[in-house]
Image (cartoon, rainbow, N blue to C red):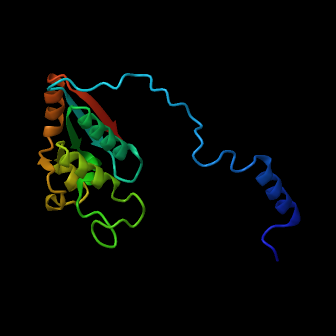
Amino acid sequence: MPLFDDEILAKIETSRNEIPHPSTEKGTSIYGSTKIFPDIQAEPGQSYLTLIHGIAHESSVSFVACLQALRALRKGFDSVVYLYGPGSMNAIATRGFPTTGDSAFPGEQNINNTLQTFMDEGGTVFVCRFGLSLHGLREEDLMPGTIPCHPLDVQDALIYFANKGAIINSTYMV
């Protein structure tokens, strides 16, 4: 017995032919490229704080926040990433399958690689110890170069950078 009857097969064929595919060739630009705002570079001493309260791989929020922090660093800002709550999981060096550092799926190491590039280029990454403990993660499993912090440091870091006049990018995932 076939999976679909003739009526359904006919509708499938009609649906496939309603719009030609592909409608454009690969490489065709379908969006404009005009950048509206100026490409602002940091003035000496300007800071950029990125707060990340999001889980790796649950959405693009944490990854995009890491990319924004890296871009700010490359614009000359003193750029800092502060991982807290579930965001602390983003700095775990033991990510990977079947062994640490491997990618069981494309992009599994995106956040680790971006945080490493960020630190290699001079960025600072703080990680909340309480955030680690909430998920049974060990401080010894943090990426080398990250800085473990006391839970009360989250608010004080925010106040510190606000007092410096920093740009603060706060991402929060629920």
Q: Is residue 3 above or below residue 74?
A: below
Can residue 174 be seen in the rendering of this structure?
no
At horizontal 71% and vertical 50% (from top left) the residue drawn is 21
Report x, y in % for residue 146: 16, 50
Can residue 77 be seen in the rendering of this structure?
yes
Residue toward you, 70 or 39: 39
Report x, y in % for residue 52: 28, 42
At horizontal 42% and vertical 48% (from top left) the residue drawn is 59
- For the image, the number of numbered tags is 0
Residue toward you, 61 or 131: 61
Report x, y in % for residue 138: 17, 60
- Seen as rendered, the residue at the extreme right is 6
At horizontal 54% and vertical 31% (from top left) the residue drawn is 32
Q: Quadrant of the C terminus?
A: top left
Q: Is residue 164 above or below residue 141?
A: above
Q: Is residue 77 left or right of residue 105?
A: left
At horizontal 28% and vertical 65% (from top left) the residue drawn is 101
Q: Quadrant of the N terminus?
A: bottom right
Report x, y in % for residue 161: 16, 29
- Seen as rendered, the residue at the extreme bottom is 1
Quarter of the rendering containing residue 40: top left
